Image (cartoon, helix red, strand yellow):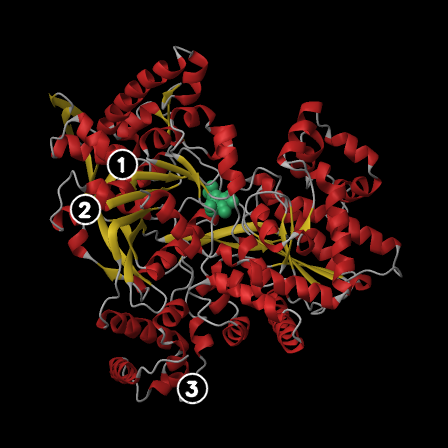
Amino acid sequence: MSISHTNEMALFDNNVQKYCRFFELASPQQFTLEQWYQVIARTVLEMAYHKPQGKVDEQRHINYLSMEFLIGRLTGNNLMNLGYYEDIKAYLAQYQVELVDVLEQERDPALGNGGLGRLAACFLDSMATLGQAATGYGLHYQYGLFKQAFQDGKQVESGDEWGRNQYPWHRYNPSKTQQVHFGGKVVAIEGDRYEWQPKLTIEGKAFDLPIVGYQNDVIQPLRLWQADSPQSFDLNQFNEGKFVAAEKTLIKSTALTQVLYPNDNHRVGQQLRLMQQYFHCACSVADILSRHLAQGFSLEEFPKRQVIQLNDTHPTLAIPELMRILLDEHQLTWQQAWSICQQSFAYTNHTLLPEALEQWDQRLFKQLLPRHFKIVEKINHLFHQQVKAQFGDDAKVWEKLAILFDYRVRMANLCVVSCFAVNGVAQIHSDLLVSQLFPEYHQLFPTKFCNVTNGITPRRWIQQANPALSQLLDQTVKGDWKKDLELLHQVENVVDDVNFREAYWHIKQQNKAALAREIEQTLSLSVNPDAIFDVQIKRFHEYKRQHLNLLNIIATYQWLKDNPNKDYTPRLFVFSGKAAPGYYLAKNIIHAINNVAEIINNDKQMKDKLQVAFLPDYRVSLAEKIIPAADISEQISMAGKEASGTGNMKLALNGALTLGTLDGANVEIAEMVGQEHIFLFGHTVESIQTLLAEGYSPKTYYRNDPVLKNAVDFLAKGKASKGDKTTFNLMLDSLLEHDPFLVFADFESYRQAQERIGQAYLDRDAWLRSAILNTARLGKFSSDRSIRDYQSRIWLKK
Ligand code: 4GP
């Protein structure tokens, strides 16, 4: 269905000609691809604001606070959502320019690490598409997530200066500038009112990116704050006790938003990070309040009109910040202010890993944010009374529930106490949140907890990433599946239709061929396009168990060496992902995969049988190339550790079959798609408990399973490290001594699942049927559904 945009395209052409003169060129023919990209983005941005705004539901405005928004390239996505993609493609053709080549010019704004940052981006897209009034609030980092390259198999990092100053989708919005204060002291005024006399003030400038709804003319801002003040400050002024080692002492104020901390599922208590968090919260809360008041509403009406959704605990300081403003600047009583906060904030938890639950050193917190500390103290004190009333004066219970404990400020506890809703991101995760992490809180506040299973936007992850599949779905499905992904169930009707099946198969093969070209270009590795493309793309973390995948690859290699004439369904194992620069064990796993890949890929006997491609610098635009080409989606975390996963949804919707544990959203994927169309393996949350209770000994598995032993020994004996037996000690010692994520315990079951996959792929018809049913049955995993769940279970719950 193509809409005619004659007038708009005339405007577009006008602008192109204008830029032509501007750049002193005789004809647009002379634009470089980079110039085309800049011209298209700037022009389309203006065109978008020329249109009358689409309707949004303002019942409650959702203020989505997140330290990360991994938005990916915006140009292609915005062209599609605005409906201009085909027009501009045709326009460029007259100059013999391919739109896809132009789109390749855009650098990914990598303003996030992975999971929760990408989720935030999908949610903004869905809120705009559903017409849910919303503003995203984040930070305008100068350096996105580091760039990754490999040197001798090892990860090396370099800064990702992504070019925020030239980014054409920006709008600098000086009318929104905020002042943010730090340090100093507080002076009591009266009752709960204090005056804060800060030591340092930094200016926060707003840069807005347009979030464009899918063909509904809704544009909402993602407002990113940038620190900008001429002065420098001494980090030690907040750090007299030197309890947090400062990376540098005298730093420029602009440094505050220079770097994104590169940690995923792990928090490091650096002072600068706490300052970033407060800066983010202070700017955002001030902006939200001034928008609310400017619309003529009273403070009492704040909870009715606003929700502040906290994406993990990183923006928790927004709670004491709103309290501070209501108490000290608007002179509300504690009860009034607390009641407003308790009805306005909601918290999403993204991990159960203890090392990821944020805690701050109390003294640092107090020196940096003296007024906020007082507020947190009072919240803690009042909450203690409530806990005593429910549980009696039980020190053990208080030790778990306290916000302030052992000279730490525990952010998750502050969230649970203060927010009206707490949600996990997949059913199993939400259940574990209640049963393992917050059981006493659940007793105290049974109605606060709920689940909202994650989702992904089909506009980016099917329409944009997989245009051929998207077209096939357009031809097959009645109604617009991009707006209502459940419509994909209609595909079940054609699962046996020869033409549809052939078209679907052909698309996968084309996508595989395209990825094979990408691999050839990047790694100079020529791969077998007919092999099973088995893909594991995500951050490197022990719990995600890329090393389980690696051990199977080694074992397979050894088996193929011993049995060169036995049947084996050829495999290409594709990896991509980064490890946090300070996470040495994860980096050790990357190193091992690269070294093993080199051996296998250089072994002529393995040619077209077994190959390993590790694509460097994983990012959204690379994911868009890998996902449509995958046959197998590796989702092999230890059960109970992956909160949800969203890559699992993207891959399955694009027709990859999941090889997974019963963890995170895999559980729900299995329910939707049916047990016959997914490869499950490994221990469950329950069987892990039994195993651990009985005393888990990884060495026993190592001794008793010769296949596992050989694979481990391959690394231990230096066969992948030029004879050096110590290179992979970090990983191997951890596996052999503790194996905290039960890699050895699941190895055998994983191998069996891989064997089933090899067999299943031989039956092309059955395989294809499963792949098609994966696409057909996973409509639930649209982020539009997630947002509707947020609306009905949290934001607009009656
Ligand atoms: C991630 C979780 O690890 C992942 O399972 C989930 O899908 C994603 O959040 C979105 O909910 N967590 C993080 C983090 O990104 O830093 O904790």
Instruction: Name the residue that disc number 3 marks.
Output: 93
Label 1 residue near ligand 1, CB within 8 Å: no
> Vertical placement of 499 versus 204: above or below?
below
Question: Residue 294 location in percent, x, y?
Answer: 12, 50
Q: Earlier in the sequence, mark 1 or mark 2?
A: 2
> Vertical placement of 329 versus 762: above or below?
above
Which of 457 and 153 lies nearest the eye of the viewer? 457
Mark 1: which amino acid? Gln
Residue 243 falls left or right of residue 114 = left
Position of the C terminus by quadrant: top left
Instruction: Name the residue that disc number 1 marks.
Output: 343
Helix, strand or loop for disc 3: helix
Whole-number angstrom distance, CA of label 1 to CA of label 2: 25 Å
Q: Earlier in the sequence, mark 3 or mark 1?
A: 3
Judge the density around disc 2: few (<14), some (14-19), many (≥20) Cα neighbours within 10 Å: some
Residue 518 in view, yes or no: no
